[in-house]
Image (cartoon, rainbow, N blue to C red):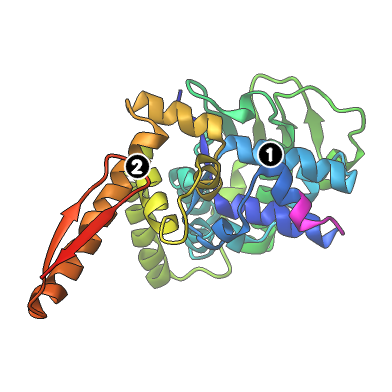
């Protein structure tokens, strides 16, 4: 079964906030099985299992049972990469919501955002995606509360206005303490509701965005659209694994655990994905190493011929052996 993926930017945002509260970064990485080097690629996606473990460890280390709210309250638009830059250059708040809904998949394939205007009210919903493995179906509280708190924060950054919500709904059950919910949202907060929803007065749609720049918007949106296309045509797991092996094998034969860490997934999930593509890690390892060997020998053969030498190559049937015999 496929698993929902999320932008590595979310991982970085959580880690940076929690470390600023005094937590130990390496403990977070170990608990979530994260390779810190993988956080350097802003376009990388991670599976939900990584975030599920990260949220759990972050709550333990901080002792903050309202962690999602507080991370959202500290949100910065740069945390969601290109989508944040698109939002910064929209003309109105209506356009902000439109673009946010349009490009949600670039930072989360676990939720969809949508809004509709009914009479004089705006219903802004955050729907958890079902039909495939998605940790948000089981543990939605901190991620969804963070999303809503972040939207309140981003609105103030963009327009200078505080969202005056009529109500905020959450599908998850009411926590033991809700004082922080009331402080942050400044409205009635209800739990165990049929939707994750913010209800707003429609007049907010006409608010101007203070940093609006139509020229920059077209540039950033073109890039965002290209990323959506590329993401929808992304490599399958076999291709990703082979690319990761090719990069790692120059130093040593990589284990499946090492490749799973590189791809920010679990060994079990990696094996499941490869099984759906009718292959195994060992098959891909053998295929990649053989291809790399042939490429290397082809390059060296050119140089050798120029030196007047002949080379006979024998490829061993053993996956960890490559034999080369030279002759005059």
Q: Look at the image and give the residue range highlighted in magenta.
A: 22-27
> Is disc 1 placed on a helix, strand or loop?
helix
Residue that label 1 marks:
143
In screen coordinates, is 203 left or right of 63? left
Residue 200 is drawn in which quadrant?
top right
How would you rate the neighbour count of disc 1 (Cα within 10 Å): few for under 14, some for 14-19, many for 20 or more?
A: many
Residue that label 2 marks:
319
- The correct choice, above or below, for 15 with respect to 298 in the image is above
Given residues 122 and 104, the one toward you in this image is: 104
Residue 297 is drawn in which quadrant?
bottom left
Where residue 97 sits in the image (x, y, percent)?
Answer: 52, 47
Residue under the image location 55 percent in, 70 percent down? 211
Residue under the image location 79 percent in, 54 percent down? 18
Given residues 258 and 96, the one toward you in this image is: 258
Observer able to see residue 186: no
Q: Nearer the viewer, mark 1 or mark 2?
A: 2
Where residue 73 sits in the image (x, y, percent)?
Answer: 76, 53
Where residue 126 sits in the image (x, y, percent)?
Answer: 59, 34
Q: Is residue 162 magenta?
A: no
Q: N-terminal of the two: label 1 or label 2?
A: 1
Q: Is residue 25 magenta?
A: yes
């Amino acid at each position: 079964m496929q698993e929902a993926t999320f932008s590595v930017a979310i991982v970085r945002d959580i880690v940076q906030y929690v470390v600023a509260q005094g937590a130990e970064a390496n403990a977070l990485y170990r608990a979530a099985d994260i390779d810190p080097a993988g956080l350097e690629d802003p376009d990388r996606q991670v599976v939900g299992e990584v975030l599920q473990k990260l949220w759990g460890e972050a709550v333990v280390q901080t002792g903050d049972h309202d962690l999602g709210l507080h991370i959202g309250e500290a949100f910065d638009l740069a945390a969601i990469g290109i989508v944040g830059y698109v939002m910064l250059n929209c003309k109105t708040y209506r356009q902000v919501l439109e673009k946010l809904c349009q490009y949600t998949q670039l930072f989360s394939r676990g939720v969809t955002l949508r809004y509709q205007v009914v009479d004089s009210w705006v219903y802004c919903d955050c729907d958890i995606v079902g039909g495939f493995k998605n940790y948000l179906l089981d543990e939605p509280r901190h991620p969804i509360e963070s999303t809503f708190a972040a939207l309140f924060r981003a609105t103030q950054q963009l327009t200078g206005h505080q969202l005056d919500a009529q109500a905020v709904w959450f599908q998850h059950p009411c926590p033991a303490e809700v004082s922080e919910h009331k402080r942050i949202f400044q409205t009635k907060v209800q739990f165990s509701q049929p939707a994750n929803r913010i209800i707003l007065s429609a007049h907010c749609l006409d608010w101007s965005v203070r940093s609006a720049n139509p020229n920059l918007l077209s540039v950033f949106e073109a890039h965002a659209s290209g990323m959506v296309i590329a993401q929808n045509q992304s490599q399958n797991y076999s291709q990703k694994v082979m690319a990761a092996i090719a990069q790692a094998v120059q130093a040593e034969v990589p284990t499946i655990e090492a490749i799973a860490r590189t791809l920010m997934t679990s060994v079990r999930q990696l094996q499941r994905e490869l099984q759906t593509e009718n292959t195994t890690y060992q098959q891909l390892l053998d295929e990649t190493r053989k291809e790399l060997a042939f490429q290397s020998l082809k390059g060296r053969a050119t140089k050798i011929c120029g030196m007047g030498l002949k080379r006979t190559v024998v490829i061993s049937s053993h996956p960890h052996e490559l034999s080369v015999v030279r002759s005059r």
